[in-house]
Amino acid sequence: MEFDDIISKVDVVMLLRVQHERHEEKMHETVEEYHEKYGLNKKRVQAMKDSAIIMHPAPFNRNVEIADDVVECEKSRIFKQVQNGVFIRMALIYMVLDDTSKK
C-alpha cells in the first residue's frame, strides 16, 4: 500500500529520521526523490483527517522525511513529543536514582 493511499485514513502519521549514514550505499535515489515519494509535505498534510496529528521523535531531516513548512504546522505534535520525552526521561532517571522508591 502506498503512503498516499492511506494518509487520509490514519489518525497519526509517525515519522522517523532517515539515517543517511546507514543507507548511503543502498539508497538509489536522491534526497529530493526520496522526499517526493515518501516525505510528508503540504499536499499530504491537506489529505489527512482534520483530527489527525503528525509525530516524530526528532531529530529530523527537514525536506527529507518531512517538509520544512510542515514541521511546525497545526497538526504537528513534534515539539510537544520531544518536550514530553525529556520529562519522561527525567522521571525515569529520578525513579532509578531515588533510594526511597525502593522501600
Image (tube, grey):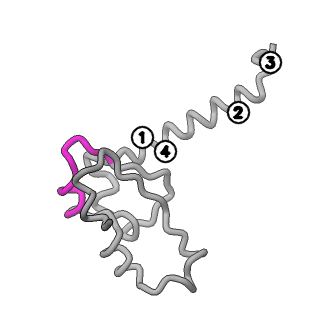
Tags 4 and 3 in contact by the CB under 8 Å rule?
no
What label does residue 93 carry, if any?
2
| Residue 44 included in the magenta stretch of the image | yes
Label 1, secondary structure: give it. helix
* Residue 88 percent coordinates (x, y): 58, 34
**Which residue type does callout 3 highlight?**
Lys
> What amino acid does circle 2 point to?
Ile
Q: CA distance from mark 1 to mark 3?
A: 31 Å
Give the image location of residue 49, x and y in percent: 20, 47
Q: Earlier in the sequence, mark 3 or mark 2?
A: 2
Mark 2 residue crowding within 10 angstroms, few (<14) / some (14–19) / many (20+): few
Q: Which residue is mark 1?
A: 80
Question: Which quadrant is home to the C terminus?
Answer: top right
Q: Nearer the viewer, mark 3 or mark 2?
A: 3
Question: Mark 1 Cα within 10 Å, few/some/many (few <14, many 20+)?
Answer: few
Residue shown at 30% from the left, 75% from the top: 36
**Real-space Cα separation, disc 4 to disc 3, in angstroms:** 29 Å
User: In the rendered image, is residue 67 in sight?
Assistant: no
**Secondary structure beneath label 4:** helix
Q: Earlier in the sequence, mark 4 or mark 3?
A: 4
Q: Real-space Cα distance between discs 1 and 4? A: 5 Å
**The residue stretch that appears in magenta:** 43-53
